[in-house]
Image: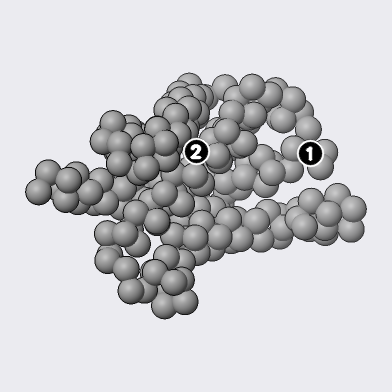
Amino acid sequence: IAMVNVFILGGDRQLWADFLAVTYLLGFYGMFIAPWLPTSGLSDRPWLERLEVTVVIWFWCVYLTAMTWELPYLLFSEAIKAAKDQMWAYSWWAWIDGGDFRYLGFDPTILTLEWFTVLNAFAGLAALRVWYRSGRTSLNAVFVFMLTAASHFYQTMQYYVSQAIVGFPSVGDTFFDLVVRFILVNSPWVVMPVMVWIWATQWIRTRVE
């Protein structure tokens, strides 16, 4: 919708980038909240089962996002940077425009974080395969989920702090750019790893007992 409005209907580029950021934020958190709603069909289930549904949604979201956004950026970053006014590159430029200008250059921090995110995704998808094939009983898969969650948490905190200590020079100068696009849109990578660890430790405890 945003691409059509910007490149075909001549809509405001920044406005639709903001629209995408809000949609992304609400969509992500909406998926995580859904298992806790009375209408979810899970309202009569134990909290640990609902939390398991929540974190599994997160696993699929975060691993597939890495495969479809981070990995293409890493492989085709030069083409993406040169395609600011082309429709196919808009999903990346909607983030670069005000989100984080470091993606326009050769930033070692960004490249390191993104490559680790992609490696996490490969490990996580392999763990999901083991998890489902074991009938959701694989302890090894749970350990991998915990490791990827810890990595996501650390990487995101480094991402935040590396900008905060220098005054956010690579973030757009509006309140929306800083609070919504930079802080809130990235916040699932801080919040959900904590949920993964809560679920995993409780899951392991139930098996030990």
Residue 179 location, x and y as percent? 48, 57
Tell me where residue 174 sits by quadrant: bottom right
Tell me where residue 41 sits by quadrant: bottom left
Q: Is residue 142 above or below residue 195?
A: above
Left or right of 206 on screen, residue 94: right
Q: Does the rendering let one see residue 39?
A: yes
Q: Does the rendering let one see residue 120?
A: no
Q: Residues within 10 Å of mark 1 (few under 14, many from 20)?
A: few
Residue 100 location, x and y as percent? 55, 41
Where disc 2 sits, the SS reads helix
Residue 113 location, x and y as percent? 45, 29
Residue at image position (41%, 78%) is 38
Q: Amino acid at mark 1?
A: Trp
How far apart, in angstroms, are the residues tagged by discs 2 and 1? 22 Å
Left or right of 87 on screen, residue 27: left
Q: What label does residue 63 carry, if any?
A: 2
Q: Amino acid at mark 2?
A: Tyr
Q: What label does residue 88 carry, if any?
A: 1
